[in-house]
Image (cartoon, coloured by chain):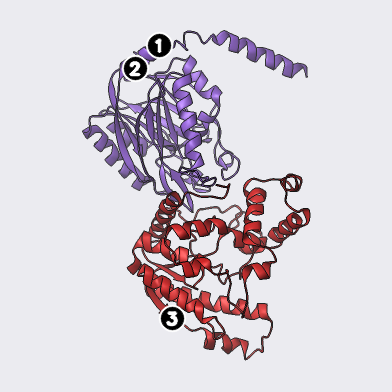
Chain colours: A purple, B red
Amino acid sequence: MPLTDCRLTLAQTNPALGAVQRNLEEHVAAIEAAHAAGSQLIVFPELSLTGYFLKDQTAELALDVDGPELRTLRELSKRISILVGFVERARDGRIYNSAAFLEDGALLHVHRKVHLVTYGMFDEEREFAAGDEFRAFESKLGRFGVLICEDAWHVSSGLQHFLAGVDAMLVPSCSPGRGVGGGATELSSETTWRTLLDAHAMLFQTWVLYANRVGWEDGVFFWGGSRAIDPFGKLVTRIEGFEPALAHASIDGGALRRARVATPLLRDSKPWLLARGLERIAAAERAR
Amino acid sequence: MNELDIHPPLVEQLLTQFLREELASAGFSRAVLGISGGIDSALVAALCARALGPQNVLGVMMPYRTSNPDSEGHARLLAARLGIQTKKVDISAMADGYLAAHEVKDRMRRGNVMARCRMIVLYDHSVEFKGLVIGTSNKTEILLGYSTQWGDSASAINPIGDLYKHQIYQLSRHLGVPSEILDKAPSADLFEGQTDEGELGFTYAEADRLLYWMVDERMSEQELVARGFDAAFVRRMAARIAATQFKRVMPIIAKLSQRTINQDFRYLRDWGK
C-alpha cells in the first residue's frame, strides 16, 4: 500500500543508562502522548530502552524479542505503530543493536544494525554482532526501511531501501555531539548529519524520519536535532535545543508521488547497471 | 577566525547542561570549587553560577602565606560579580605543619603539597556544602601535564577539560569574567613571580596551536613541520605529553583474576543513572 497521509511523532528521549524499567515507563508516557496528539507512528532513538555506552551492561540488558518489555510495547502498538531501539539477544545467543517495528499488537520487523561503529570513541563491534541485511517492510502506513545511525553513513544501505521502493527511511540514532572549533555556530556533528539526511531524502526521494537522543553519559552528550524531511529534501519539523522533546508532524502522502513525478529518480535508477558494475569490481578483485 | 575559535553561546549552553545533568546523575545540585583569582577557576565559577544558580555554588579561596594578595582580591571581585557563596580557608598552618616539620625546601615539592592541601579542603567542603568538586583544569594544561596529580587535577567532573587556553579566554569574555582576571598573566601562584608561560618556556598561543593540530587533527611530525612548526618544539611537546600520561589515567591495577577493574570490568560512572 502506498504511503498514506498520516501523523507521526519523533521522540527525542534521554534514556537512563541501563535502567530499562525506567526507560520503558518513559516510552509508555511518550507513546500515550503521541497517541493523544493523533499520531499513528512514533519513532524512538537507537538503543532507546537502554542508553548507549553500555560496555559490560550490554549482555546484562539484552532482551528477547518475545520478552515482557517488548510485550508491553507490542500491546500499545494496537493503538499506534512504534519503532523502538533495544539490545537484542537472538536465539543463538548473539547480541545485536536492534530496532523493532511494532504494529497492531505484533512484531512486524526487526532491523539489526549492520554498520557497527568501532573507531575513535566507539567500540560497538566489541559489544554487538553485526546485522547482515537491509530489508524493506510493509506497514499499514506505508513501506519502510530502517537505518540505525552509522548504517546511514554507508550509501549502500539507503540505496538498497531506495531500490526496494521504501516510502520512508526511519533513522534512529545515538549521535554524540562534537566539533566546536572553526568559529562555527553549530556542532560539526550537526552539520554533517544535516547534509547526510538531506542527501538521503533528495537522492533516494523518500521521507527521512530521524530520531536522535539527547542527554549526557560520562561527559559525552547526544545532540538531538530529530527531524522529518520530505522527499524533496525540505525540512518538515525539527526539534530545537538539546533537551528531551516530542515533535509531531503531518505526513502528506501525496508528496512522495509528486516528487517521483517531478524527478523520476527511482524509475531511472537502472539497478542492473549497479549489479553489473559490482560484478565487474568483484571479478577484478578476485583476479588481483 | 581560526581553527580554535568557538561560538561561545553554543559552548555555554552545552557546558551548563553538562553541569546540571552530570551533577544530577550523581545525586547533587550544588558545586564546590577553588577560586584562585585566575581565569580557569573564574570561568568554571561563572558556568556553575549560570547552570545551578549562584546560591548553589561555593567558591573557596585557599591562600598560602606567600600567595600574591592580588589573587584573593580577584577571587573576591569575581565572587561578588557572580553572587556565589564564598569561604576563605588559609592553608598556611595546614601546609606548614608538614613542610616545616619535614624541612621541605624544594619549590616543586612545596607547590605540590599546597595543591594537595587545597584538594583536601575542597573535598571536605564537598561534604559540608553537599556539592561536588568541580574541576578547573583546561585541555592545554592537562595535555602538558602542568598540574599536581591528586592536587589541582582532582575533581568529580570538569566542564573545561576539553577547551584549549585560547577557548578559555573566548568563553570567559563571553561570560563577563572581570577584566582584571582576563588581562593578567596566568600563574599557579605557588611562588613569587611565577608565571605559567615563564615556567613552561613557551606561550599558550604556541602550545594551543600545536596541540590542536597534533592531538585533535592527528598530524604527523612531518606534517606539523610542513605547517611551519619548529621540529624541536614539536618533538619536545610530543615527549612531554607522553611523559605525563600517568597524570591522565587511573592507577594501574595488576591483573590476576578473570575480571579486573577497568580491564574487563567496564562500566560508565553514570551506570544506572
Would you name the residue on which mark 1 appears? A262
Would you name the residue on which mark 3 appears? B88
Q: Residues within 10 Å of mark 2 (few under 14, many from 20)?
A: some
Q: The disc numbered 2 marks a residue on which chain?
A: A
Is residue A119 something one can see in this rendering?
yes
Element carrying mark 2: helix
Distance from Cα at disc 2 to Cα at disc 3? 66 Å
Would you name the residue on which mark 2 appears? A255
Q: The disc numbered 1 marks a residue on which chain?
A: A
Q: Position of residue B257 (x, y in %)?
A: 63, 57
- B83 in relation to A118, above or below: below
Residue A136 is marked as none
**Pick the front one: A70 or B89:** B89
Q: The C terminus of chain B is located in which quarter?
A: bottom left
**Pick the front one: B82 or A28:** B82
Q: Tally the numbered discs.
A: 3
- Looking at the rendered structure, whether the residues under marks 2 and 3 are on a common chain is answered as no
Residue type at mark 2: give it.
Answer: Ala
Residue name at image x 50 percent, y 50 percent:
B6
Element carrying mark 1: helix
Element carrying mark 3: strand
Residue type at mark 3: give it.
Answer: Lys
